[in-house]
Structures are given as structure tokens and as C-alpha cells.
Amino acid sequence: MAELPIPFNLPHVSGNELKYIEEAIASKKISGNGAFTQKCQGVLSDSFGFRKVLLTSSCTDALEMAAILADIKPGDEVIMPSYTFVSTANAFILRGAKIRFVDSRSDHPGMDEELVEALVTDRTKAIVPVHYAGVASDMDALLSVSEKHGIRIIEDAAQALDSYYKGRSLGSIGDMGAFSFHETKNIISGEGGCLVVSDSKLDDRSEIIWEKGTNRSAFWKGEVDKYGWVDIGSSFLPSELTAAFLYGQLENIASIQKKRLEIWNRYDERLRDLQDLGIQMPAIPEYATNNAHMYYMVVRTEQERNDLIDHLKRFGVNAVFHYLGLYKSEYFKDQHDGRALTECDRYTRGLLRLPLHVGLSDSDLDRVCRAVRSFYNLSF
Ligand SMILES: *Cc1c(COP(=O)(O)O)cnc(C)c1O
């Protein structure tokens, strides 16, 4: 009998998720900002040193909140990598911003920090680094540009929970940071996310925007005696059912991360030598840590990648490519300023991600590595 296919990702239940959902239901409070939301926010703050955390329904929502909080207005410019997810850009497009896309680094798909300053104009309002694969952008380089020109930094830390830059938690270094708990990330709640607010001047407004533009949050805390509509906002907060699931995951973050790191290291031991063939393997700069969000390889041509994906499929291994550079997307291509983003193109064509989830067994890992190596006629 053929072996079962190995999925690229498999959402997993780590322990008490169902129990906590039942508790939330029994408590007769399943809308947002209840006990489980507070608990998740508390754990995230305590574990990672986040100054203020607001749970959201997605990282997309957290980025949209950040764009409102950064006061992005029509015509303002925002600098970010082209090799990223749609939501990184879309959040700012919704506010009328003009996006200046930056090319990726040659050793890593994250944005090339050295190209950022040349794109700064007097309309530039924010720089949005994306910590690709949970590996930090060089934040000191970006902070020096942001301080010199008075520009905010908003970190897209969707993939970067439990990852660090020179010992500081990613997502807490810029003015704001956005995380995702989508089922493809390390810690999950189906859909989910949070906004980290590090600039205390944004605290009050962040709660208002979170609660549909009302001061309801301050009302519950007894800070105002009636609540009403005071600003723009939306329904950014998740239900308690989502927060209950997330709390179950956050309780087990240490064991989840340990398992993912074991898998990542096993891949690396067995596949690192592919770099001798001119294939780019993951790089972790000395200022960064590895949260084992992703194990990827960058092969030389799109044809090679497609052939490798087909080859792996014959072994029952589902490997997937990743972003299509946003600057060439159907929505954006006519707005791009014409700069060639050749590294972004190279990752768009050649990057391949291998299965990585806590349900992978040793024999699954053997199968993936044997399949990859056999494509290159290498022994296993
Ligand atoms: C997953 C991801 C997002 C979107 O997260 P959602 O929670 O699905 O909205 C945004 N940016 C990056 C870099 C991501 O990896």
C-alpha cells in the first residue's frame, strides 16, 4: 500500500484547547475581550516583554490597526519588501498610501536594509520590515534611518513569534508589531493575530480602534462614565472561542518550539550540503535567532523548482513555493516605479518550502530528505 502523503502543514491541538473552549462557553461570555483574551495578552506580554498586546482576528487586522494608528493618509509613502504577503501592503493601501517596494537581500528573502534610505522622501511615514521565516531584519540599520528621518517602524512579525534580534523580541522593537496565529504559523488559533504597541502614546487610541471606534474599553475599566463613538475603527477583536484555543497553544509554546527546532535542525543536517550545488539554504545572521518557522531552499530556476515539486509529490511529499513578488502583481504592477527587484524575482522563481509541523515523524522526515536528495542523485 502506498504511504500516506505528507502534508506541507497540519494544524495541531497541543493540549487544553477544547477544554478551554468549553470553559469559555460555560462562562456565558464568548464575544471578544473576555477572560481568555486577557489571559493570552498577559502571557504574551510576560513571555516576550511586549509592553501592550491586543489580540486581533488576524495579522491582517493587526496591520490594518497599525496603519490607522500610524495616521497614514492618502499620498503618504510606506517602504516595505516586495517579497511578502499581500496583507503587509494592503493594510496601507486601504489608507491611501503609496507603497515603495524594496528588493530582498541576496542571502535572505527579507528586505535589503541598505536600499531603504534611498527611498525615503518627505512623504515617507513608515518602514515595514517583514521578518521572513521568523529571521530578524537588521533592526539597528532600520532604526537609524527611522530616527534620522522621523519615520515610524511597524514590524510585520507574522512569522516571528519567539524570535529575537540581539536578544530583543521581534515585534517589540519598532513602534508596533503585528503577529499571526493563522493555522500555518507556529502557534495557532485557526485565524488569529495580535498587535504589539510599544509606543505608549498610541495606547488609548489602539483600544478605541480595536473596539470599533468606541471608548468601550475605557468604559469597562471605569475611566469614562459613558461610552460612544469617538474615532474610526473596526471589529478587530477575536471571539473568546478563538482566544480560548489560543491560550491552550500558548501554554505549550515551549514544547511546540522545541519540536519544531528539532525538525528544522534535522533538515539542516541532512540537506545543508545542497549548497555545494549552488542551492541557497536558510541563513541566520549572527544578530538573529531561529524560531523554526520554516525550512526553505532556493533552487536555481523556476523549472528546477517545478520539477522538484513534482518529484517530491511522487514520494508523497507536499512542498510548496511562496510569495509572488508584490511589485509585479496584477493589482500593483502599474503603480511600480520601474526599479528592477532582481532578488525578489529570484525568490519568487526559486524558493521552495518543505513540510514543517509538529506532527512530522522521524520516518516522515526521512522520506522528505531522501526524496529531495534523490532528485539531485545524492546518497541518503
Ligand atoms: C501569515 C502572514 C500574514 C497574514 O497573517 P493572517 O493572520 O493570515 O492575516 C501577513 N504577513 C506575513 C509575512 C505572513 O506570513
Image: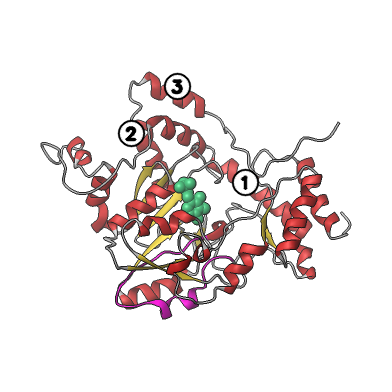
Tell me which residue sits at (29%, 77%) in the image: 122
Determine if residue 282 is in view.
no
Q: Residue under circle 2?
A: 32
Q: Is residue 110 magenta?
A: yes
Label 2 – label 3 distance at C-alpha: 16 Å
Label 1 – label 3 distance at C-alpha: 28 Å
Magenta region, residue range: 109-131
Q: Disc 1 or 3, which lies upstream in sequence? A: 3
Which residue type carries mark 3? Glu
Looking at the rendered image, the disc whose residue lies closer to the viewer, 1 or 3, is 3
Q: Compare residues 199 and 85 and report the one nearer the observer.
A: 85
Secondary structure under tag 3 reads helix
Hey, which residue is sitting farthest top in the picture?
26
Which residue type carries mark 1? Lys
In the visual, does 237 lie left or right of 335? left
Looking at the rendered image, the disc whose residue lies closer to the viewer, 2 or 1, is 2
Q: Where in the figure is residue 199, as x and y percent of width and height?
A: 29, 59
Determine if residue 368 is in view.
yes
Secondary structure under tag 2 reads loop
- The image quadrant of residue 120 is bottom left
Tell me which residue sits at (23%, 46%) in the image: 208
Q: Is residue 207 magenta?
A: no
Q: Residue under circle 3?
A: 22
Looking at the rendered image, the disc whose residue lies closer to the viewer, 2 or 3, is 2
In the visual, does 89 lie left or right of 294? left
Mark carried by residue 258: 1
